[in-house]
Amino acid sequence: KDETVSSVPGQTQLSPDELLSRTASWLSVEPPPTPALVESSLLALLNAGDWEAVGRLSHPNMGYVVSSRPPHTSVILLARNLAFLMLNLRANNPQMIKKFGRDVWEMVAQLVSNGGTKRPKDGGAAAGLVSRERAAVTAFLCQLAHEPLKRLTTSLIASLFNVARDDPNTDILSPDSAVWPTGLATNQAIQERTVEDMLTQVITSAIAKSPKDPTLLRMLADIQFANSRYSSALSLYVETTAVKSDFFQLELGSSLTLGMATLEESVVGRLVTCARELGRLTQAVVLSQFSQEPNYAQAFKFLEDRSLDGSDSLYGCIWDMAVLEFAMSLHTKRGEVARRREALHCIWQLELNTNNDEEIIKEAANVRKAMFLRSLAMQFF
């Protein structure tokens, strides 16, 4: 067997395959192992992506399963259902994905629903048990390191949060949201604050392990946006875009680059909202151009209002001729000579001439997008 030398003298370190084999064998011993060892073993198998082993070794007839007690029973069942869900996602079996997606959803949903927060007749014992189960499940989810599984579980809790909040304008978006049964009648009992606490812990832990995962960064930005923390949200949206575009070197927009959009339409809208709420109206104008169909009425209104972000100093980042012409007309009416001159200087840029080929205009826009986002990034990180 392959073994590597341990840092401790006189000891050897097991190879990954041998370690997994021994981990699996620990779950089969009699008398059953301790709950802590059980959870560590299941966690190791899940992080290794060995879904078959988890499914096989978490059968209800296994000794440690039969003897388990809350809150550990919930962790074991969750590990089993997650393993089967990942298996069927890999096999692309819609019927079984729906089944196990619902099993996972209902199990976690009951831990963050008002049934677990009401004071029962027994003086709070049941509420205390639910609280311990929620803490155990949260701690278990925080230790997941398998990338697809980690994103799936954060998507689960994000979808629970969306259901509890019931505001499409502040939904936390995730690529796996279609897996979850968000239309169940029982979803009305989900508590927003409880599920947000769980989500914050899980996603913060996931980002600590994968700090450059754009999906996780985007979800954390969405949480900040949903809670009206616009400065933090703006910073995180910019960081997400920086990660996706190799610090704004790739093409910036909603078209696919390397298989993904560097800046989706939904993010553009939220960036504009963040800038507007922070009083950075000229930044909001620049960001409005990133949309495939800019809201010119909104952008012109931003230009008319007094801004807190330097106004004409950002005109060099504007490439949309309609916006520049409106700015020049506005400053002419107001007698703002210096600002009118700045807008006119930008209009005269040869690469922005509307008679140019589409590729030239597109490249001019990309240069200005990158310049603006880099300057924005310098304000945050």
Image (cartoon, rainbow, N blue to C red):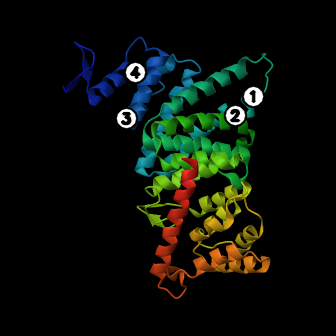
* Quarter-of-image position of residue 321: bottom right
- Mark 1–mark 3 Cα distance, whole angstroms, equals 35 Å
x and y percentages locating residue 264 in the rendered image: 56, 62
Q: Are marks 1 and 3 in contact (CB under 8 Å)?
A: no
x and y percentages locating residue 65 in the rendered image: 49, 21
Q: Residue at x 47, y 85 (%)?
A: 357
Q: Camera-side residue: 56 or 119? A: 119
Amino acid on which the number 1 mark rests in the picture: Thr
Q: Which mark identifies residue 117?
A: 1
Amino acid on which the number 3 mark rests in the picture: Ala
Q: Residue at x 78, y 16 (%)?
A: 122
**Which image quarter holds the N terminus?**
top left
Mark 1 is surrounded, within 10 Å at the Cα level, by few (under 14), some (14 to 19) or many (20 or more) other residues, namely some
- Mark 2–mark 1 Cα distance, whole angstroms, equals 9 Å
- Mark 4–mark 2 Cα distance, whole angstroms, equals 32 Å
Q: Is residue 175 visible?
A: no
